[in-house]
Amino acid sequence: MRPEALATVLAAEIPTEMIGLDVTRKLIMKASEVDPAGAARSLLHDALRFYVEFHRKQEGLAAP
């Protein structure tokens, strides 16, 4: 996240919880595990698709 984006989020005074990136290293999800969760194109689905694509591109993880 860019610093100005974080400043905007924090200035909104919406309850926010920061989670370290190390959390994303504890579980690897395959694309086939993410797709069923996204039947309604939820925010969670979009975030998980981003996660799968990012790690596929950056680390060469297969995304069946």
Image: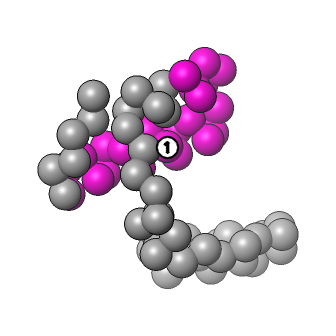
Q: Residues within 10 Å of mark 1 (few under 14, many from 20)?
A: many
Please state the horizontal and vertical placement of residue 34, each as a whole percent of the image: 49, 33
| 3 or 50: nearer the viewer | 50
State the scheme by which the image is colored: one colour
Q: Quadrant of residue 7?
A: bottom right
Please state the horizontal and vertical placement of residue 3, each as a whole percent of the image: 49, 81
- Above or below 12: residue 29: above
| 32 or 10: nearer the viewer | 32
Residue drawn at x 31%, y 43% as measured from the top left? 53
Residue drawn at x 19%, y 57% as measured from the top left? 59
Is residue 56 found inside the magenta-colored segment of the image?
yes
Taking the image as shown, residue 58 lies to the left or right of residue 37, namely: left
Residue drawn at x 52%, y 70% as measured from the top left? 23
Please state the horizontal and vertical placement of residue 49, each as a whole percent of the image: 43, 39
> Does the rendering let one see residue 50?
no
- Above or below 31: residue 19: below
The residue segment tinted magenta is 36-58
- Residue pointed to by mark 1: 48
Taking the image as shown, residue 42 lies to the left or right of residue 32, namely: right
What quarter of the picture does the C terminus occupy?
A: top left
User: At label 1, which amino acid type do we have?
Assistant: Leu
Residue drawn at x 73%, y 73% as measured from the top left? 17
